[in-house]
Amino acid sequence: MRGERAVVATIAGAIVIPAGEKRRTVYDAGQGRDLPGKLVRGEGDPATHDAAVDEAYDGAGKTYDFYQKVYARNSIDDRGLRLDSTVHYGVGFDNAQWNGRQMIYGDGDGKLFQRFTKCLEIIGHELTHGVTQYTAALAYSDQPGALNEHFSDVFGILVKQYSLKQTAGKSDWLIGAGLFTKRVHGAAVRSMKAPGTAYDDPLLGKDPQPAHMRSYKRTRSDNGGVHINNGIPNHAFYLAATRLGGKAWEVAGRIWYAALTAKLSSRAQFGDCADATFEAAGNLFGIGSAPQHAVADAWKAVGVPVSATVLAGEPRLTLREVALQPASATQLPAEPRARRSRRRRIS
């Protein structure tokens, strides 16, 4: 599944609210494609009994609470951005996406996919694209694009674990669990525990994700394989988090959050991410600490070793101040793409 990653320059200033106050609005497109649609639920309003509306509202709230309570982040942009969502977008629309200013959810085609508000980790995944937009601004192609998808999977699964109060050992580590209909032979869209095993279906094909650099896919499709090759860093995070145990958002998640928000630049490669997370682990938990060793071993296990200079204690990546990075006012998000094929991946 693919979604637009454009940035709207004026939105942060236009919809800023005080820290610690979430403000959610949910709109209904009524199977049309005009955004945002009809307002159906605002912050503090009672449940509507429309599953998609209420799931979008609750999922945005749980994601907001996760970032605010765990990492003291004031909404997606860290400046109190209002969280807007549109449900019932299009007819049989097989996607969920953050389009640079709001969430968009399709109801699925009912044959392969169910409604996309159903999975909390998908909501957390998509809203994290907004976090990336305002921090590292990772380019959406090749390895930077795979890292863009990787960080969304990491914090998507952590939102779910935090909501369920799950330890790393209890999590299913699945992205999109329960999204497929019963017709599909598959557990989820992606598996961080075992990339390449999420589904194997006659119509969708077999999950193509690699778990190691030896199987890295070089392709011109999917923006250079951003939804395929993110299986490699995904597995590294899984290995680090499960080795450390406990609540993954407290140690491994904090390391990855620091790398995303304070160390990586837009053209970062997998090796840069390995170095950044290793350095972040040292900064947060001490040089030579158990978390730092776990991070180094996890990246080595997927074929992306931390660079020798960084292992030697010579920082290669400079710490940068987190800053809001809006694009030009003319860079507006395009309309979501219509379905092109049955082999799709969550954006």
Image (cartoon, grey):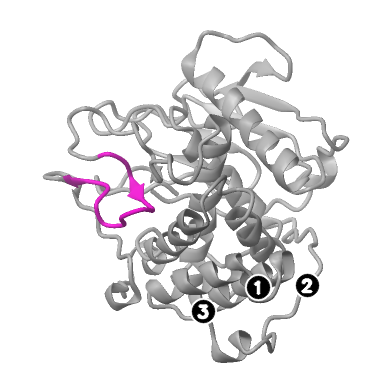
Location of mark 3 (residue): 271
User: Where's residue 21, x and y in %?
Assistant: 81, 30
Residue holding disc 1: 265
Residue at 70% x, 51% y is 8
Left or right: residue 295 versus residue 322 is left
Horizontal and vertical percent for residue 31?
44, 23
Q: Earlier in the sequence, mark 2 or mark 3?
A: 3
- State the separation of the CA atoms marked 3 and 1: 12 Å
**Image spot of residue 188 (x, y percent):** 31, 41
Amino acid carrying label 1: it is Ser
- Most foreground residue, 20 or 336: 20
Main SS class of the magenta portion in the image: loop
- Mark seen at residue 320: 2
Q: Is residue 253 above or below residue 308?
A: above
Q: Which residues are magenta?
A: 187-200
Mark 3 is surrounded, within 10 Å at the Cα level, by few (under 14), some (14 to 19) or many (20 or more) other residues, namely some
Residue contact between numbered discs 3 and 1, judged by CB atoms under 8 Å: no
Real-space CA distance between mark 2 and mark 3, rounded to the nearest whole angstrom? 18 Å
